[in-house]
């Protein structure tokens, strides 16, 4: 999805259209969740400190994130995907891999599937999606960014090596700043230069990842689309504008518990453990967790357990905290008798 959170805000509020929109809470400790394409022309991007974004574009419109709304739109998009394939691997609310080797409507090519999906998303959500079509996951990921916004880029199998050759090595998955610097020491800055190096040299320098680099430089990626990734945790957290004492965190814990509860799928897997995350003013991280005899049945119960966990913090009373998070973990299948019954069971 293109500038997903910002695009949802612009869709729902016509006054924001055409303006530089930054989805973030204001404050020196907040970070940008998303930036509209109008904001990106000023150099604003996600994960940037909100204060820096404000300096880059004083006229930017700051909108606090509404993750409940974004999740609902994400659900609509996933419903579109499911009409075409069951092999869907979500990466985030706004991005997913789809294996359409065999597709439900029986369309002749993956390109036609991508065109149909993008058209359905536009019709049903009034939002733009970009797509990359390629023989494997890492190439499709690169291709999906190639013609953003609102673009479609296709890499045919016979085009793979020609496409990869001029790319900087940083475009390859897993190549961060440290690996890029190490490759540059070896005189490797492009994929073509990487492909010219023998496997033995790369393995000697980078170990197991050297084999991965050797394959990526040749367009080889055998990782399948993992259709069902089970949730491991669900949480919400906030960073405070000013450091706070422990006794001032109760209301924030209540609010975070409500956010987490509202995001929980009542028909999905059931969480067994409640956990609390704290970060002190001097950046020490603390966690506390509790697995009650039965899972929380409401936002109020979740908040009550969060308060119990707060009471377990035994640092000096002068300690101040910059971040609080509340979460659920240890998900399992719900017992049969607790699952929501089907609306129609086929009996009269």
Image (cartoon, rainbow, N blue to C red):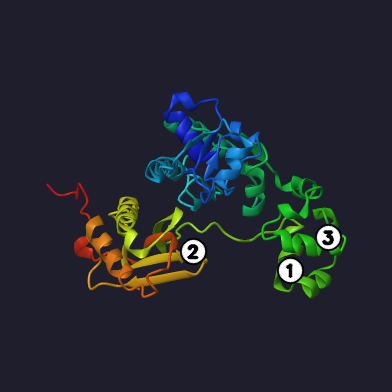
Q: Label 1: which residue?
A: 211
Marks 3/1 in contact by CB < 8 Å: the verdict is: no
The answer to whether any part of residue 129 appears in the image is: yes
Is 134 displayed left or right of 1 in the figure? right
Mark toward the viewer: 2 or 1: 2
Residue bearing mark 2: 281
Image point (27%, 69%), residue name? 308
Q: Counting residues from the N terminus, which is met first, the one under dot 2 or under dot 3?
A: 3
- SS class, disc 2: loop
Disc 2 to disc 3, C-alpha distance: 38 Å
Residue 202 point in image, percent of width and height: 80, 69
Residue 279 on image: x %, y %: 46, 65
Which residue is drawn at the image coordinates 57% and 48% (left, top)?
49
Q: Is residue 254 above or below residue 15?
A: below
Res 184 label: 3
> Viewer-proximal residue, 279 or 105?
279
Residue count near mark 3 (Cα–Cα under 10 Å), binned few <14, some 14–19, many ≥20: few
| Quadrant in the picture for residue 50 | top right
Residue shown at 79%/72% (left/top)?
205
Front of the two marks 3 and 1: 3
Q: Please say if 41 is above or below 140.
A: above
Any part of residue 106 in sight: no
What is the x, y in percent for residue 51?
Answer: 57, 44
Under circle 1, the secondary element is helix
* Nearer the observer, 312 or 23: 312
Q: Vertically, is 17 above or below 267?
A: above
Q: Nearer the viewer, mark 2 or mark 3?
A: 2
Residue 31: x and y, percent? 53, 48
- Identify the element where label 3 is drawn: helix
Q: Earlier in the sequence, mark 3 or mark 1?
A: 3
């Amino acid at each position: 999805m293109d500038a997903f959170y910002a695009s949802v805000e612009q869709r729902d509020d016509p006054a924001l259209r055409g303006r530089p929109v930054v989805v973030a809470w204001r404050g020196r400790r907040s970070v940008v969740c998303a930036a509209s394409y109008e904001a990106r022309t000023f150099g604003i991007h996600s994960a940037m400190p909100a204060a820096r974004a404000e300096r880059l574009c004083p006229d930017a419109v700051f909108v606090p994130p509404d993750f409940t709304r974004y999740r609902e739109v994400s659900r609509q998009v996933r419903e579109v995907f499911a009409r075409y394939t069951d092999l869907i691997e979500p990466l985030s609310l706004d991005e997913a891999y789809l294996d359409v080797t065999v597709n439900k409507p029986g369309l002749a090519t993956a390109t036609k599937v991508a065109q149909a999906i993008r058209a359905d998303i536009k019709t049903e959500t009034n939002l733009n999606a970009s797509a990359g079509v390629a023989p494997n996951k890492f190439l499709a990921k690169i291709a999906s960014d190639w013609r953003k916004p609102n673009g479609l880029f296709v890499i045919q199998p016979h085009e793979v090596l020609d496409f990869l050759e001029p790319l900087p090595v940083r475009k390859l998955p897993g190549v961060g700043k440290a690996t890029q610097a190490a490759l540059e020491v070896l005189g490797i800055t492009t994929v073509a230069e990487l492909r010219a190096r023998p496997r033995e040299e790369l393995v000697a320098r980078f170990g197991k990842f050297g084999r991965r680099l050797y394959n990526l430089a040749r367009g080889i990626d055998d990782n399948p689309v993992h259709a069902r990734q089970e949730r491991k945790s669900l949480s919400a957290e906030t960073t405070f504008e000013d450091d706070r004492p422990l006794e001032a965190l109760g209301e924030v814990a209540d609010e975070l518990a409500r956010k987490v509860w509202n995001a929980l799928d009542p028909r999905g897997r059931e969480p067994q453990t409640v956990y609390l995350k704290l970060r002190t003013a001097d950046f020490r991280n603390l966690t506390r967790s509790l697995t009650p005899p039965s899972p929380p049945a409401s936002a109020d119960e979740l908040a009550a357990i969060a308060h119990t966990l707060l009471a377990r913090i035994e640092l000096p009373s002068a300690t101040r905290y910059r971040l609080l998070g509340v979460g659920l973990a240890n998900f399992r299948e719900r017992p049969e008798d607790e699952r929501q019954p089907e609306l129609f069971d086929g009996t009269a």
